[in-house]
Each structure stands twice: as structure tokens, then as C-alpha cells.
Amino acid sequence: MSKLLVLTFADKPLDESNHLRKSCEKYGIKWKSLIHSPWTENVIRLKLLFEFIAEQDPDLVVLVADAYDVILYDNPEAILDIFLSLKSDIVFSGESNFSFKDPHKWIAYLRRYPRGQATIYHYLNAGTFMGRAKHLLQLLKALQEICKIDLFDEEALLPIKSDQYLLSRFFVDNSKQPGKLKLSIDERHTLMGCTGGRFCVLKFPDLGKWQAFSFFIIERSLLKLLSLHKHQKIPKDFTFRLGRFYNKKTETYPPIIHFPGTQNRFNNILGELSKAKPVFSKKGTWIFAAGISCFAFIVSLSVGPLFWFITRRTS
């Protein structure tokens, strides 16, 4: 059986209250945190990963995970079994929002994106992904070539900011390359559950994939513009059941859970969903945020079909 290592990145050692550390220790999973202080931009994770992975056993299976908003719910054997069953070199967690830091190329990459048909979680999330060391090393070397960057040049990396942006670019471009790595998105959340693109102020029904896609973008953009995005905190798909998180949309219990955000937000979400304590209260500006959510839903009814049309024209 292949060995599993959980690898994360932080600006200081993880303390005993850290959920990722606690869950690894609970289930007997080996873990390591690579320290970079002060922390600058998330893209630095790729540099740290490259330096580390080049010295590992090529067959070591590595779960690359965010340090402060990820928690595990199973033993290493069960996690490895699910990973191997997906029959991919590298598996990325799937979210429903296409986060892409280059606005000039966002539509172009959205149109070219190799979307699956299984669920709404088509899009790569860099907060959790998993593969053998040799395949991760192959990915990073190919990413340098395709994106024309030097992952060891920290000054050149900093303006890029987002590792998710680079990995999303690579995921799209790699799909067109001969002899490419076999990459996949865990659309069914069988291995990695991710709430990216699925938090909201009010829980409206999904009226199609593109309506749901556009609703989150519109609601998020308006809330951030008005500094009200703290109210976008209701997970549309996940609930806590039988001592772990359950995705109602996919009907799965993924053993790796990622709720993108800050450490405090993650702690609050875990507390609220597990009913450990009442964390959120609807006071003050929530009513205004709820009005924005209603407006976003109405607008998404028109914008959703527009996204469908734009992407359909190139299929």
C-alpha cells in the first residue's frame, strides 16, 4: 500500500488547536508543514512544494492542503483507497466558482474549460489536491513550461499572487497537450469536499448550473464592494451528519473537507454546522445583505443563460 503524507504551508508552526493537525493526529496520518515567514502570497506554496517534492520517494502519495480551513475525517488507508479508485495522476478538489485572477483571460479560459457532466463542481480548487510525488513534480515542471514562469524566482512569482490561478491555467492548457498528465476534478466530492462558490446570504434554489454559477459571482461581488461579504456564510450543500460532513447534493461523505476562508471563519462554520454553539446572528447589516442576495438571484436568472450561450458557442 502506498504511503500518505499531508503537506501544508504556513507562516508559523501549527499549534495543537489547528484542525488539520488535530485530525491528522487523530487518524494516524503523517503530516508536515512547510514554513515561510513572513507569508507573502499564496503562489509561494508552489515554490515550497517544488523544493520539497523533488526530494521525496516518487511513489509517496501527497495530499496538499491549506493549513487553516481543512479538516480530515478518516484514516489514511480509506483516503488512499478513494484516491486510487479515481484512477488519475492528480486529483483536485472541485468547486462551483471559476476563480481566475486575470480578468482579461477569464472568459477565454472559462469557454475552454473542460467541464464534466456529473455535478456543478467543475472547477479546480487549489486548497486540496492529491497525487504521487513523481506526478506532482511532473506537474510543476510542466507548469513552468506552459505558463513560462520560474517557480524558484520568488520576486517574479509575487505579482502573480494566486497558485489557484496558475493551476487553473495549467489544468485547461494541459488538457490540450499530447502525453499529458491525467488530471481530474473530484466533481462528486467522493474524496474532497469543497464549499467554494456555495456560500450565500440567503439559500435560493439552483435553477440550472449557469444560474447557480452567476448567482454566487454577482452576490459575492456586490457584497465585497459594500464590505458585507461577512454575511455570505450559509453553505448551500453541506450539513453535519453522523459525526462528519455530508454533501446533500452529491450524497457523499468526503473524508477531506475544505471550507475556503480564514481560520476564524472556519472555526465559526465548524461550530455552526456541528451545532456546537450558536455562532452567527442576523443583526444590523444582515437585512441589507439579504436584500442584495435577493437582487443577485433575480439578476442571475438573466445572466445564467448568457453564460450558457457564451460557452455553448465554442463547444
Image (cartoon, rainbow, N blue to C red):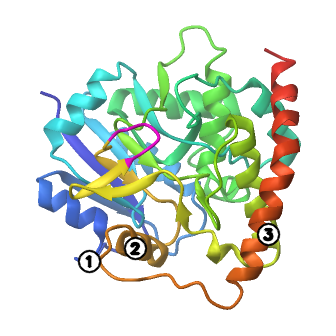
Front residue (pair 238, 172)? 238
The amino acid beneath tag 3 is Ile
Q: Earlier in the sequence, mark 2 or mark 1?
A: 1
Q: Which residue is mark 1?
A: 17
Circle 2 sits in a helix, a strand or a loop, which is it? Answer: helix
- Circle nearer the viewer, 3 or 1: 3
Circle 1 sits in a helix, a strand or a loop, which is it? Answer: loop
Residue 239 percent coordinates (x, y): 38, 57
- Mark sitting on residue 292: 3
Instruction: Classify residue 214 as left or right of residue 127.
Output: right
Cα separation, mark 2 vs mark 1, equals 18 Å
Q: Quadrant of residue 191?
A: top left
Q: Which residue is mark 2?
A: 272
Magenta residues span 247-252
The amino acid beneath tag 1 is Ser
Q: Is residue 261 above or below residue 300?
A: below
Instruction: Classify residue 197 as left or right of residue 188.
Output: right
Is 248 contained in the magenta span? Answer: yes
- Circle nearer the viewer, 2 or 1: 2
The amino acid beneath tag 2 is Glu
Q: Earlier in the sequence, mark 3 or mark 2?
A: 2
Front residue (pair 97, 302)? 302
Q: Is residue 107 above or below residue 22?
A: above
Circle 3 sits in a helix, a strand or a loop, which is it? Answer: helix
The quarter of the rendered structure image containing the N terminus is: top left
Q: Residue at x 35, y 75 (%)?
A: 271
Q: Residue at x 73, y 75 (%)?
A: 289
